[in-house]
Amino acid sequence: MKRLFFCLMATMSVLILSAQSIYDFKVKDDVGKETTLSDYKGKVLLIVNTATRCGFTPQYKELEALYEKYAKEGFEILDFPCNQFGGQAPGTIQEIHQFCTANFNINFPQFDKIEVNGANAHPLYVYLKSQKGFGGFDVADDRGKMMDGMLRRQDAEYDKKADIKWNFTKFLVSRDGRVLKRYEPTDKMSDIEADIQVEVNPVISNIMARRSVRKYLDKPVEHEKLEVIVRAGINAPSGMNRQPWIVRVVEDQKLMADVNEVYKKENAEQVKRDKDFKNMFRNAPNLICVCTPEKGGDLDAGLLGENIMLAAQSMGLGTCCLGGPVRWLVSNEKAKFFIDRLEIPTGYKLNYIIAIGYPDEQPDAKPRDASKVKYIK
């Protein structure tokens, strides 16, 4: 019987972790009616486990302020009361809801009480924890230091587990269902608001979501989409409107295959080491080649490329800006047929290539060094 139980638990965990997004989960609302989180597709979500008798309970006021400020921009707070931390969420969901409306005048949706840790943890929270584990408390902050000390006395290795640590842990979810960040109850609401501002603004969220993609589905991009993307590119700023760039969009699959065969023969050992190798262009099915005059035009071409990559991101496509293949193509006589097909005018050079296609991966963002930015006031 015990063996069967563990088999069932393992099967359930696999099913939960294989869920594609939070929209696969069902929850009960504050009147016990089952609903699906797919109702919130297209909205930016902040999912919170709450309690009514906690030192962090006044955060309800800050949460409501966020909700009132950004709800019209497609922002929702999903509140899941939980009584697992010090028994600080007693009573029925109706009593909790009455308390919250009377004391904090909340308007965001509350759901039935759940457990977030242990064998009876709601599948939604199993998934959320699998996407964003515990990142630690800021021990330079008094509240963070207090929480770290309290929990470490209970378990010296508490920080090595993804479990929810206390009431008012929060998860930020993008409009397309990706779990972006996890916030501990001691994290500043101003920092959370800054992240929300990024996500509710479609232009900024598109910029922040863009990643360099190196794995693509075996599916060429439709010509109509490539036309729109390139049109966005050539509408980039250009000094004195000179538009010095020349753009070549490669849709010819045979051309790409032929030059790739040359590359494979010339770089056999490198290709052999790369088990994921499909082609020399980061495995992309299409290319956007950007050419500039032999002297000048680089700044304008950079602006053009950024427009192209952001337009592609907004249409569900992935991109990667390539320099290595350019150096190989222009220096290898056996690849001259590829360069010739681009029909690059005299006095111009191939500057860079943008690999483009339907992504087969979702890379995490790499850290950025904000200390390099100085504000001169």
Image (tube, rainbow, N blue to C red):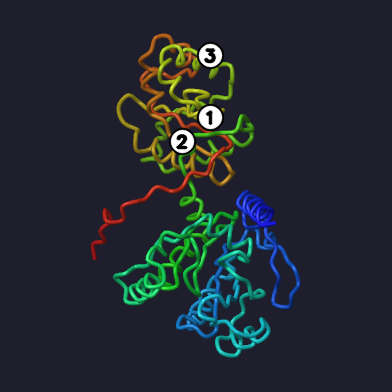
Residue 62 in sight in this render: yes
Instruction: Say which residue appears at 26% left-offset and 53% top-offset.
Output: 372
Instruction: Say which residue appears at 45% left-offset and 83% top-offset.
Output: 55
- Distance of label 3 from label 1 (alpha carbons): 15 Å
Residue 243, position in %: x, y?
Answer: 42, 35
Quarter occupied by the N terminus: bottom right
Residue 219, position in %: x, y?
Answer: 63, 30
Residue 101, position in %: x, y?
Answer: 61, 86
Q: Which mark is residue 348?
A: none
Residue at numbered disc 3 = 258
State whether residue 369 is above or below residue 27: above
Q: Amino acid at mark 3?
A: Asp
State whether residue 358 is above or below residue 332: below
Residue at numbered disc 1 = 284
Circle 2 residues within 10 Å: few <14, some 14–19, many ≥20: many
Q: Quadrant of residue 104?
A: bottom right
Q: Amino acid at mark 2?
A: Cys
Residue at numbered disc 2 = 320
Lower sequence index among marks 2 and 3: 3
